[in-house]
Amino acid sequence: MKSKIGVLALQGDFQAHLQALREAGAEALEVRTAADLASIDGLVIPGGESTTMLKLLEVEGLFGELAAFGKAKPIFGTCAGAILLASEVENPAQASLGLMDLTVERNGYGRQIDSRIAEIEMGGKPVEAVFIRAPIIRRVGAGVQVLSSYDGHAVLVEQGRHLAATFHPELTGDVRVHRYFADKVARASG
């Protein structure tokens, strides 16, 4: 049976995540409400603008629901999603779900003009990574495993059931990162 993985569909390129998850073998669903959360095994929080996403979560009454969901089930955050998963956010400080022991600096690589495509390694194989106004992980806690680095910084990390990427794996044709998460969800729900 396929894992049901939701993609938070309030902001960001959630459609690209849905497509990548489907290509990775998961059943992918849009998530907009607390009721949607109840029907899934894992969740992707896409990129976007983290302060805007926080406001939308509050307006929709989802912030507390997401925090509770993350205490029981896997979440994969990309870019702004990684910021929301962190325990500490800088530049400026802001609220977060606090589900991963990370310190993340918003827009750490610079402004939009500083966005880039780079090659990173995952499991010893090259992966294309798209960084758009990307955050930098400044600190990883003792329980966080670094899966990939770029320019001296962790860019793909996991802690327990959760996964965070400071880049946008959904913007490439390579679904290995999404497959990695889908496999985590399958193990967690199986």
Image (cartoon, rainbow, N blue to C red):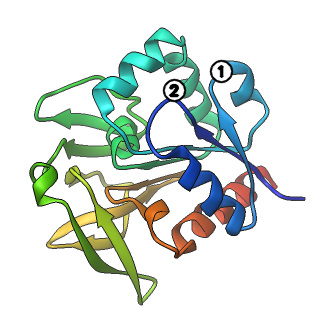
Q: Is residue 109 visible?
A: no
Q: Quadrant of residue 60?
A: top right
Of mark 2 and mark 1, the one earlier in the sequence is 1
In the rendering, at what x and y percent does residue 127 appear?
40, 80
Q: Amino acid at mark 2?
A: Ala
> Mark 1: few, some, or many residues within 10 Å (few <14, many ≥20)?
some
- Left or right: where does residue 108 sit relative to residue 25? left
Tell me: residue 179, above or below residue 55: below
| Residue at (39, 27) in percent of width and height | 53
User: The N terminus lies in which quarter of the figure?
Assistant: bottom right
| Residue at (38, 32) in percent of width and height | 98
- Left or right: where does residue 170 sit relative to residue 85? right
In the rendering, at what x and y percent does residue 175 appear?
57, 71
- Left or right: where does residue 184 sit relative to residue 77? right
Tell me: residue 29, above or below residue 172: above
User: The C terminus lies in which quarter of the figure?
Assistant: bottom right
In the rendering, at what x and y percent does residue 80 appear?
34, 41
Q: Which mark is residue 77?
A: none
In the rendering, at what x and y percent does residue 185 appear?
68, 55
> Mark 2: few, some, or many residues within 10 Å (few <14, many ≥20)?
some
| Residue at (29, 51) in percent of width and height | 141
Comparing labels 2 and 1, the label whose residue is closer to the camera = 1
| Residue at (68, 65) in percent of width and height | 183
Disc 2, SS: helix
User: Who is closer to the viewer here, 28 or 3?
Assistant: 28
Q: Which mark is residue 33?
A: 1
Tell me: residue 129, above or below residue 79: below
Give the CA separation, mark 2 to mark 1.
14 Å
Disc 1, SS: loop
User: Who is closer to the viewer here, 34 or 15?
Assistant: 15
In this figure, which residue is indicated by the disc labeled 2? 67
Q: Is residue 152 visible?
A: yes
